[in-house]
Amino acid sequence: MTPMATITSELDHLRRHLNLGGSVEMIPNAIAIAELAVEKQAKVLLMPVSARRGLNDLPDDLWTKISIEFYKDPDDAVFKGFGPYVV
């Protein structure tokens, strides 16, 4: 996947979890999302900080296979979604 396709995919995921007021919705099953990301060979997963409690039961071997970046608000998510591409 090209870097631009990765960015587009991350921003599309983010768009689905933002509401019109600009706040971030809870992710109902953060572990399933992390497992899917590892299955799809993702290296980094971008999730709202509110999802960290839902990841308490994530198996240790999955923690070693993926880096999870947490964001606090939509602005932070966009900045982290672009990662090294922000100049």
Image (cartoon, grey):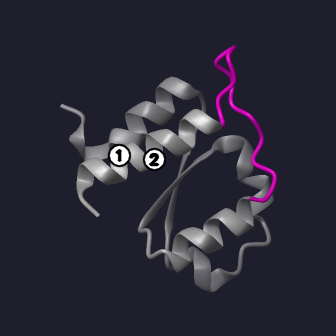
Position of 54 relative to 83 (above/below): below
Residue 22 in magenta stretch: yes
Main SS of the magenta part reads loop
Please give the range of residues in magenta.
17-29
Residue 13 in magenta stretch: no
Position of 56 relative to 23 (above/below): below
* Mark carried by residue 10: 2
Position of 40 relative to 14 (above/below): below
| Residue 80 relative to residue 25: left or right | left
Q: What element carries label 2?
A: helix
Q: Where is residue 87 in the image (x, y as percent from the top left)?
A: 18, 31
Q: What element carries label 1?
A: helix
The amino acid sitting under disc 2 is Glu
Position of 38 relative to 74 (above/below): below
Q: Where is residue 28 in the image (x, y as percent from the top left)?
A: 81, 52
Q: Quadrant of residue 37?
A: bottom right
The residue at which mark 1 appears reads as 7
The residue at 73%/42% (across/down) is: 50
Label 2 – label 1 distance at C-alpha: 5 Å
Q: Are marks 2 and 1 in contact (CB under 8 Å)?
A: yes
Q: How crowded is mark 1: few (under 14 residues within 10 Å), some or many (20 or more)?
A: some
Q: Residues within 10 Å of mark 2 (few under 14, many from 20)?
A: some
* Mark carried by residue 21: none
Give the quadrant of the N terminus: bottom left
The amino acid sitting under disc 1 is Ile
